[in-house]
Amino acid sequence: MAKIDHKVPKVDKKKCIGCGACVSVCPQNVFELKDGKSHVARPENCVECNACVENCPVTAIKLVKPK
Ligand code: SF4
Ligand code: SF4
């Protein structure tokens, strides 16, 4: 996979309650719910809009530089 040169969301699975807000709010379809937790399915699509971070009720999402 090509290196991603922008930030991507990281979900703290211990905090995530599987509410689906990030899935709904992301304009880029980055997230999917998987086994009741948010999964970052398409990090390459992230445009760093911060909507997921702001709308997660349990502050489980951070934007981070991928390794
Ligand atoms: S920062 Fe924006 S584009 Fe990136 S995952 Fe969150 S909601 Fe989607
Ligand atoms: S908005 Fe937060 S709690 Fe809800 S599914 Fe996404 S990461 Fe989990």
Image (cartoon, rainbow, N blue to C red):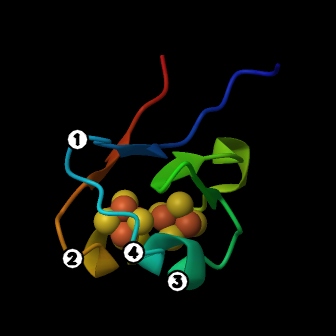
Q: Quadrant of ligand 2?
A: bottom left
3D distance between C-alphas at marks 4 and 2: 8 Å
Q: Upstream in the sequence, badge 4 or badge 3?
A: 4
Q: Can you give x and y, in whole percent of width and height, for residue 49 in the image?
A: 47, 72
For mark 1, does the 10 Å Cα neighbourhood hold few (<14), some (14 to 19), or many (20 or more) residues? Answer: few
- Residue pointed to by mark 4: 19
**Mark 4 near mark 2, Cβ–Cβ under 8 Å?**
yes
Q: Quadrant of residue 64?
A: top left
Disc nearer the start of the sequence (1/2): 1
Disc 2 residue: CB within 8 Å of ligand 2: yes
Taking the spot 28% from the left edge, 42% from the top edge, the residue there is: 12
- Secondary-structure class at tag 4: loop
Q: Nearer the viewer, residue 16 or 55?
A: 16
Q: In the picture provided, is 54 more to the left or to the right than 7? A: left
Residue 28, quarter of picture: bottom right
Q: CA distance from mark 1 to mark 4?
A: 13 Å
Q: Position of residue 29 (x, y in %)?
A: 71, 68
What kind of element bears circle 1? loop
Number of residues whose C-alpha sits closer than 10 Å to that of mark 3, classed few (under 14), some (14–19) or many (20 or more): some
At label 3, the amino acid type is Val
Q: Earlier in the sequence, mark 4 or mark 2?
A: 4
Q: Is mark 1 within 8 Å of ligand 2?
A: no
The disc placed on residue 14 is: 1
CB under 8 Å between callouts 4 and 3? no
Q: From this view, report whether residue 10 is shown above or below residue 30.
A: above
Q: Are marks 1 and 3 in contact (CB under 8 Å)?
A: no
Q: Label 2, on which residue?
A: 57
Q: Which residue is mark 3?
A: 25
The answer to whether the beta carbon of the residue marked 4 is less than 8 Å from any atom of ligand 2 is yes
